[in-house]
Amino acid sequence: MSLVTRYVSRLVLSTIRTNSFPGVQSKCHASTQTTDLKEVLRDVIPKEQKRVSAFKAQYKDTSIGQVTIDMIYGGMRGIKGLVYETSLLDPNEGIRFRGKTITECQKELPKAKGGEEPLPEGLFWLLVTSQIPTKEQVEWVTCEWNKRAEIPKHVVTMLNSLPAQLHPMSQFSAAITVLNLDSKFAKAYSDNVPKSKYMNKVTSAQCY
């Protein structure tokens, strides 16, 4: 790999990590005043699609590394195979969420009254939208989660029938899989609904 190619590869990887695609502005900023996450995503998704399209058009033929036989036999270790923008674990800098360090998240994300750490709902909003939520938006997510917290009876029955010594993560995974019975996305897939329309199947709780 030539020095020029290596430089371009590092530039591309840095661009992916920071979400700073050339020619398209992308920053973690305070969110809009809309509290409905679905409505926020209606605004965010087209902009993200434009951002990614611009990036792909400029760098579509750029190599981001080499693959060796040793890497393949090593379980694909070290091979860059996909773009994952919600978080990045760097061996030197630590983890970042949408480009923000833990310290930055602790400073910028909303906290509970009297609390010192960010609420998980705020981090969820940041991961999904790449925006810093307002207090009202975090409260909306809390309400939404509470509305969806009821576990179907068939899932409870299944969990109660599992061996008590079964690892908790195995039980959790099994429960998530069984929830597929009521999945609106699974039904949409069976009905051949285009992926671009999946979000229309999501209903929002009346959290006001």
Image: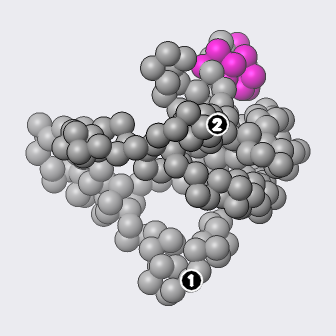
Residue 19: give x, y in percent of width and height.
69, 41
Q: Residue furthest front?
A: 2
Which residue in the protein does label 1 denote?
193
Q: Disc 1 versus disc 2: distance between alpha carbons? A: 38 Å
Please report the residue visible at 36 percent of the width from the left and 55 percent of the height from the top.
Answer: 176
Tell me the mark number nearer the camera, choosing from 1 and 2: 2
Percent across and percent down for residue 102 are: 60, 19
Front residue (pair 94, 119): 94
Question: Which residue is painted at 29% across and 43% down in the image?
Answer: 68
* Dot 2 crowding, Cα within 10 Å, few <14, some 14–19, many 20+: few
Q: Quadrant of residue 49?
A: bottom right
Name the amino acid, label 2. Answer: Leu
**Which residue is the extreme one toward the right?**
33
* As drawn, 141 above or below 183: above
Residue 202, numbered label: none
Q: Is residue 205 above or below residue 138?
A: below
Instruction: Residue at 75%, 22% (x, y): give it.
Output: 108
Q: Earlier in the sequence, mark 1 or mark 2?
A: 2
Q: Is residue 94 left or right of residue 27?
A: left
Is disc 1 surrounded by few (<14), some (14 to 19) or many (20+) residues within 10 Å?
few
Q: What residue is shown with label 2?
A: 11
Report whether 159 appears left or right of 140. Answer: left
Magenta stretch in the rendered image: 102-114
